[in-house]
Amino acid sequence: MRAFRVVLWAVGLVALVGLFLSLKEGLDPAVWILCMVLAVGCPLAAEGRAARQTQGRQRAEQHAWYAENFGSLEALREAVDAPALRRIRDEKGAAHAVREIKREHPRLPLDVAVSLVKAL
């Protein structure tokens, strides 16, 4: 899928050159507007798609790590200091407790950390 990203960037660069040429030649404003939209939109689409793919890959790696090391919410609950997390949740809020879990286990998926704090 890297080829698709390259193609989108190439279209964006060609559109940028087309924009300059259409402005120089005095072509219809619709042509240079189209070139401007393509010159900006194609690279943005390429990078947005790449970012989503990277996030999905990282999320899958985190869930695989969780399944390999803990496997269940009960096993995770036994591995953390539940009374301390409960105290943090009650005093500072659930977000602080989730941050504490993520600080202790950075590879833990966020949805699992949230589920653990809610289950305490």
Image (cartoon, rainbow, N blue to C red):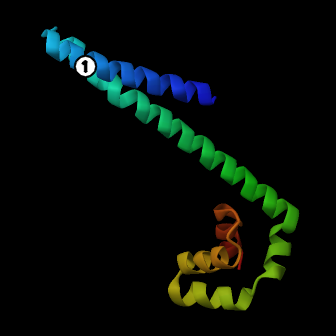
Question: Which residue lies at the image location 53% right of the left edge and 81% below the top edge?
Answer: 93
Disc 1 crowd rating (10 Å Cα; few below 14, some 14-19, many 20+) is many
Which quadrant holds the N terminus?
top right
From the viewer's side, name the closer residue of 89 and 8: 8
Q: Residue at x 42, y 32 (%)?
A: 43
Q: Is residue 84 above or below residue 79?
A: below
**Residue situated in front as seen by the camera: 117 or 45:** 45
28 to the left or right of 42: left
Q: Where 108 falls versus 17 (above or below)? A: below
The residue positioned 73% from the left and 50% from the top of the image is 60
Q: Specify whether residue 55 is in view.
A: yes
Q: Is residue 71 left or right of residue 6?
A: right
Q: Residue at x 41, y 35 (%)?
A: 44
Q: Is residue 112 above or below residue 92?
A: above
Q: Is residue 34 visible?
A: no
Is the C terminus in the top left, top right, bottom left or bottom right quadrant? bottom right
Q: Is residue 80 above or below residue 44?
A: below
Q: Residue 96 or 33: which is nearer the viewer?
A: 33
The three-letter code of the residue at mark 1 reads Leu
Q: Residue tagged by mark 1?
A: 19
Return the x and y of residue 107 as percentages of the image width and height.
Answer: 71, 66
| Residue 65 location (% of width, % of height) | 80, 61
Q: Please identify the residue farthest to the left as the structure is shown.
A: 26
Q: What x and y, as percent, mark residue 19? A: 25, 19
Q: Secondary structure at mark 1?
A: helix
- Marks counted in the figure total 1
Asked where in the image residue 51 lies, by quadrant, the reply is top right
Please name whichever residue, 88 or 16, is drawn nearer the observer in this view of the structure.
16
Using residue 26 as the reference point, say whether residue 103 is left or right of it: right
